[in-house]
Image: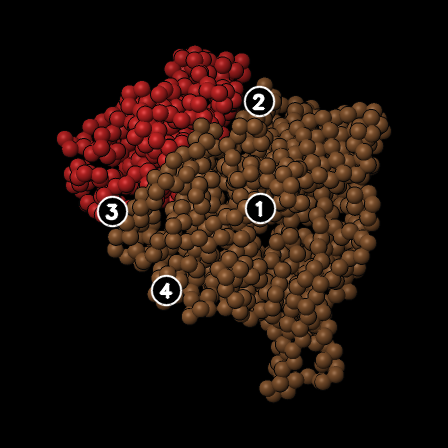
Chain colours: A brown, B red
Amino acid sequence: MNTLNQVGHPSPRIDAQKRVTGTATYTGDIRLPGMLYARVLRSPHAHARIRRIDVSRAQALPGVKAILTRENCDVVWGSGDTRNKRYLFNNPVRFAGDAVAAVAAMDRHTAEEATRLIEVDYGTLPFVLDPEDALKPGAVEIQPGGNHSPNNQGARQPEVYRRGNIEEGLRAADQVFEDHYTSAHINNAQLEPRVSIAQWEGDKLTVYASTQGISNCHTEIARDLKLAPENVRVICQFMGGGFGNKNQCHDFDLMAAMLAKQTGAPVKLEFTRKEDFLAVHGRWPTKQYYKVGVKRDGTLTAIQLRGYSGMGPYRKGSGGIAGIEIYQCPHVERSVTQAYTNMAVSANLRGPDYPQGVFGIESLMDDIAYSLNMDPVDFRLKNMTRKFNDQTPYTSIGLEDCIRRGAEAFEWKKRWHAPGVGFGPVKRGAGMAMGSFFSSLGRSSAVIDLDSRGMYHVHVGVTDIGTAAKTTMALIAAEELGVPLEKIDVIWGDTGRCPYSVGESGSRTTTHTGYAVVQAAKDLKRQIAEKGLPQGDQMLTAAANTNPTVQNAARYSFVAHFAEVEVDIELGHVKVVKYVAAHDSGRVVNPLTATSQVKGGAIMGIGMALHEELLYDKQTGLPLTAGYYGARVMTHLDAPEIEVHWIETEDPYGPFGAKTLGEPTIIPSVAAVANAIYNAIGKRVKDLPITRDKILAVLA
Amino acid sequence: MKSFANVNPREMKDAVAQLRQPNAIVVGGGSDLLGLVKEHLVQPDVLVNLKAIRGLDQVSAKGAEVHIGGLITLDTLSHEPLIRKNYTVLAEAAESVATPQIRNVGTLAGNVCQRPWCWYYRNGFPCFKNGGNKCFSVAGENQFHAIFGGGPSFIVHPSDTAPALLALDAKFRVAGPAGERTVPAADFFALPRVNASKENVLAKDEVLVSIQLPRAARGVRSSYHKVLDREAWTHAVVSAAMVLDMDQDICKSARIVLGGVAPIPWRLPKVEAMLAGQRITPELAARAGDAAVEGANPLAKNGYKVPLTKAVVRRTLLGLTAKA
């Protein structure tokens, strides 16, 4: 039973009215006096050496104020590549969409026109799109030293994890299953396109960004532009989504700052939707080869994964392939190679390493269950993780309850059946999958001021990327302080006014910054007890810089999703008709917005399962499906009802026991849909997305 | 986008005259044109906006015929009672287009004359449609391309209303410098082997003004079946527009036109002949589906359209005869 007053009760967002009435000021809404507009010229080639750039015609266009190219700008974008030196403008250009020049002008139209007047002489180079092809001898070298991107130790070797002895595990098996899967590059497809506004006052720079993390954006702008951190301010009051591709500072933030510096005027740099799909990053495409050994009774003896991730030409993301850790198994070997390709850059997208990896392993585990005549739910209950990597106890684990309660709510026993049976052309099928996600604890800060009117001013460096972080912080503060929500005033989204907060990535804000809010509130309560309430101009201030850790335990969130689909086997059409999601994210701070997170994540996963792919033309290395139309992003009509169940484990860490939530929501969804399709038609599509042509091909 | 001038003629003959200026282009609803201009696929100096010309957005009965102004929005068209009742296939086709926002501004003439949505064309590849001399889909990503009538370009015609109009035996009124002319729907669309850079016979200074539908016979039933890759806002993967003239349960005559399979709306005369005078049984419908794909010539990645087309033809036929 919930004995808390604020936490755990559904609460509308504190900024909901502003957002829905259009009065919220998003970064794109900001206009500063004398502001210039900027546009970026991008490479039309997959890979080319720039032999010459002539900006004279663009420069001569009335209204053009500044043009940046590699020739007059050598700023290195630190977070654009963790292995190589990536400039704002690179030569050679290494993917279609790589920035070549940026123009600031009096208005948008002139800026865009000017980019078209820049004459670039490209010498095209060979290109490679597939990560395995990129690693073959003779493949064109995209980065100095070759296309095998160095691992975390700096060696051009795969990232490897081992426990037990894989050969022994495979020998111990009664049966070894072997299969391979691929997943596509897809875009984060957040609603708000990219925009950045930079303004200098003397040597002080203010950037109005659309960012998931004002603090890391701030630190990195200072680093990349060689400025003192106190001379940089980053503001993001309202932002319209990012799903991992707006964390950190981006090249366009730096371009806006450099253009503003050169022109002496504020500069707003905007992307088109197509640029948004190509020029930042999306989810890395993967190729996954599995071997799984199993006893006749369904006990796992070995899991082996050899995987390849295509990172695009710059190493911006981890390129990991996760999922096998959800199974207990004595002998495990995972080897993943990250390769440079001439596709769009790959990096974080909601649960970066997971949905594609879980699609692979959960497809294969499903096949194994069928082949052993086991119910897939029973198979997972038998083999699911009990300890992290079979070694470290979890701080709390509700996975079994997620599976059991989810299955019950879904009516699994009624809906699931032998694969591919049923009369008529429309086949129904049920599928499920499970997942876990690291629920981190770590550094963050909060400051709470109490004034004599009884208002608590909570300063937190969150931007609220759509998760309702502001509301979450207010609820946590109100709970700990024991005051009504109306007494909380949240100050957010401005490094000039807020202390450090972790970037809103890794689903960390509630656990990191929420914990700091709890500690600041505790301190403030102590001060009130000591000094009494403030009077007149007095103010009480409590600050917390927290960095909690977990000892000898692993802290994870858990999830199981269940999907039912209808597949029309003549049309190849798939419709998701029922969907149940069961989540252990510890204590749920705000069930209203948490439920929205689950719905959003599940729907995103269904889109990844059925539709989305940044498809490339193999003849030219150019993309074909950038943008909402081409990517076939889910519409409201495509989205089923998502039924959400909370398994609220008691976790001793985090604010009121809250564990992570945003990213687990997408992790098993792709696999659940894929498994439901298999159950419906009795054939398995192993390459994402599971489109009509592939369904009709396996049925032919 | 590039700078351009906008003119608002009030008479069609002025519009046609304005179109004779160099680099002028006609705009109705603008929902497709705006995207083309933004992507620099067309770079007009003058937009000849038709919206100031009165009376081109109406449905009117003219004797036994029905005339539809080319500027009628797809949304209005799909709700017009006369169209819904007697020309159901057209109402259904109109309401299947894109999204409510686009149907609110997109016009019938614009939908019929819409440029292809081939991803090579829309991404500016130097293909036939962009003034080049190659169809990149042939050796490329041709999942959505033509299985009939392709070569040298393999685009599919993007319009939903065009197959419906052809199935209804519509006539197109076209205004040009020499006045108006009437073009039967069957002659309006042109295969790439005739001219690979365009999809119809309109000259640069001609405008599709209105559409005339013949009297709807009493026993006529019609419908439009569109297979899309998501529930909204995609073009047809395969579609079928079907008009049957029924006498009790006997099909006196049929007109069947496919969308999404060819560079023009693709009529199936052999299937129509096969159905004439017949009772439509499930067996006959299945044979009609098989006959529908005779002569199909799929590329490497669009072979799935063959069984898909069979199923769509069979089902639409059975759906219509069960409608009675």
Residue B129 location (% of width, % of height): 33, 30
Dot 3 falls on a residue whose secondary structure is: loop
Q: CA distance from mark 2 to mark 4?
A: 58 Å
- At x 42% / y 22%, what residue is drawn? B138
Q: Which residue is mark 3?
A: B4
Q: Nearer the viewer, residue B215 or B292?
A: B292
Q: Chain of mark 4?
A: A
Q: Nearer the viewer, residue A577 or A212?
A: A212
**Mark number displayed over residue B313:** none
Identify which amino acid the numbered label 4 is placed on: Ala
**Mark 3 residue crowding within 10 angstroms, few (<14) / some (14–19) / many (20+):** few
Q: Which residue is mark 2?
A: A697
Q: CA distance from mark 2 to mark 3?
A: 48 Å
Q: Nearer the viewer, residue A630 or A361?
A: A361
Q: Which residue is mark 1?
A: A83
B301 versus A263 height, above or below: above
Q: Nearer the viewer, residue B201 or A33?
A: A33
Of tags 3 and 4, which is closer to the observer?
A: 4
Identify which amino acid the numbered label 3 is placed on: Phe
Image quadrant in which you'd find residue A362: top right
